[in-house]
Image (cartoon, helix red, strand yellow):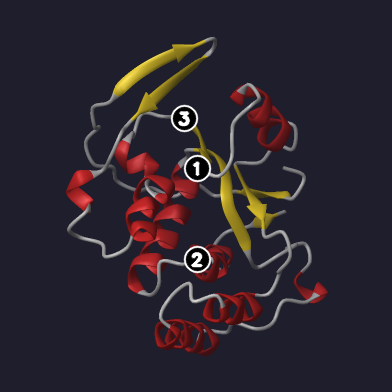
Amino acid sequence: MSRIQSIRIQFPLLIGHISNTSGMEIVHKRCKLKVTSSVPKYKNVFDTIDSVKNVPKLLLHRLFPDVRYSLWIDGKLKLVKDPYQLLERFLWRKNVRFAISRHYRLFDVLEEAEANKAGGKYDNASIDNQIEFYKREGLTHYSSAKFLITSDVPEGCVIIGEHIPITNLFTCLWFNEVDRSTSRDQLSFSAARDKIRSRVLFDN
């Protein structure tokens, strides 16, 4: 959890929502949890499990428009702390709106793309096309010149956010990149982030 980087977002923008979805509610201490066992209406739309996973991961505010805060944790992790402690540690204490875990080793999207190809994570030609498109849009290697940005590659296994219009817009842009190219969200995070940064103020 120490690798989580926080992003402060200002200048709220407007975005629409779709209707709420039903789900079982569990009230635990101060938290109300929404439990959904599947997202069946998306199974025929996306061709990989990563694509299906990105719907609740990045578009949670579209599924549950009344939620104020959310915490995404990949299935490989286990939540052992009170969620309020995580909100306090990574959002409220730093007065930020969005926090995401950094990749444990890589900071450069171009290196992450090569690692994805070497690991057979996705079709190599699709990854190459995605990266070449981002290069034409201005993607460069990560360097200290990008500071205060501490990494271009998230791990994405932990996402903590306050659902205000600008953070919702950011995750919508991120999802659009995932949907348009490959489902490897690590490759498209910085592209969506930089689109927002070109219009509003980010502080890490």
Cα separation between marks 3 and 2: 22 Å
Q: Secondary structure at mark 3?
A: loop
Asked if residue 168 is positioned above or below residue 111 in the image, the reply reads above
Q: Nearer the viewer, mark 3 or mark 1?
A: 1
* Label 3 with label 1: CB-CB less than 8 Å: no
Which residue is at 35% across, 18% downward? Answer: 25
Asked if residue 163 is positioned above or below residue 13 in the image, the reply reads above
Q: As shown in the figure, which amino acid type bears the numbered disc 1?
A: Gly
Cα separation between marks 3 and 1: 22 Å
Residue that mark 3 sits on: 68
Residue 182: % across, % down: 40, 72
**Lower sequence index among marks 3 and 1:** 3
Which residue is at 42% across, 50% downward? Answer: 58
Which residue is at 55% across, 75% downward? Answer: 119
Looking at this rendering, what residue extends furthest in the right direction?
A: 144
Which residue is at 82% across, 73% downward? Answer: 144
**Lower sequence index among marks 3 and 2:** 3
Residue that mark 1 sits on: 75
Residue that mark 2 sits on: 192
